[in-house]
Image (cartoon, rainbow, N blue to C red):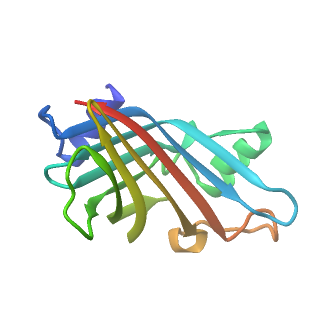
Amino acid sequence: MNKLLIFTLAFGVFTQASAQKFMTKTGQVSFFSDAALEDISAVNKQALAAVDLAKAEVAFVVQIRGFEFEKALMQEHFNENYMHSDKFPSSKFNGTFQKATAITWPGTHEVELVGKLTIHGVTKEVRVPATLAVKGEEALLNTKFKVKLSDYGIKNDKANSISEIIEITVKTPMKKS
C-alpha cells in the first residue's frame, strides 16, 4: 500500500484537498549526537508530512530504516541495537501549531508545535518551536529540538558511544494538496 495513503489513514486528517492543506513525502528529518568517541549523524529524506492551515493541524511520519549514515556499521547499530526498527518501524508526530498572534497567509510565522511524539514505541507530549512559511502553492515547516533517549526507552548501553541528548532537525517543503 502506498506510504502516503497509509499516512493519511493513520491520522484521519487531510483526506480532502483544499487550498489550506499542504503535504510532502520527501521531508527531511536528521539527527545529531555529539559523543566523546565520534559524532553521529543521519538523515532521512522520505518523511511524510502534512499541514492543515485552517485547522492548525500538523502530522509527520518517518520510517526508521530510511535514515542514512556515513558509515554502514553505524546504520546497522542504529537499527538493531538502539531503535529496534523491526519492532518499531516508524516514528510520528501528530498535533497542532499554536500561535502567539493572529496568523495571516501567506507569510512566515514563528509557531509552537504541540502534540504527541512517538519514538521507539513510546509517546510523549511535546512542545517545540517551529517556523511555518506559506507562499503560493508551497509551505515550509522547519523545527529543531532535542530529545532525551531514556525518555523514549532507548538504552545507551555503551558508555560515550552516543549522547543521551539527540538534536533532531526537521525540514519539510510541502505543496498544496
Query: How many numbered tags mark residues here?
Result: 0
**Front-most of residues 120 and 143:** 143
**Front-most of residues 134 and 15:** 134
Q: Is residue 102 left or right of residue 124?
A: left
**Front-most of residues 161 and 172:** 172
Choose top left, top right, bottom left or bottom right for residue 149: bottom right
User: Against 104, is 106 above or below?
Assistant: above
Quadrant in which the N terminus is drawn: top left
Q: Which residue lies at the image location 15% right of the left edge and 53% below the top edge? A: 55
Choose top left, top right, bottom left or bottom right for residue 110: bottom left
Instruction: Name the spot of residue 139 as percent of width and height, x first.
Output: 33, 39
Q: Which residue lies at the image location 43% right of the left edge and 41% below the top edge? A: 172
Q: Is residue 31 left or right of residue 157?
A: left
Instruction: Name the spot of residue 49 as percent of width and height, x first.
Output: 35, 42
Instruction: Name the spot of residue 45 as percent of width and height, x first.
Output: 53, 35
User: Against 147, is 44 above or below?
Assistant: above
User: Against 2, is 89 above or below?
Assistant: below
Quadrant in which the C terminus is drawn: top left
Q: Which residue lies at the image location 11% right of the left edge and 34% below the top edge? A: 16
Instruction: Name the spot of residue 46 as percent of width and height, x first.
Output: 48, 34
Q: Is residue 140 left or right of residue 12?
A: right
Q: Which residue lies at the image location 14% right of the left edge and 31% below the top edge? A: 17
User: In this view, which residue lies farthest toward the top?
Assistant: 2
Choose top left, top right, bottom left or bottom right for residue 160: bottom right
Q: Is residue 60 visible?
A: yes
Q: Is residue 123 visible?
A: no
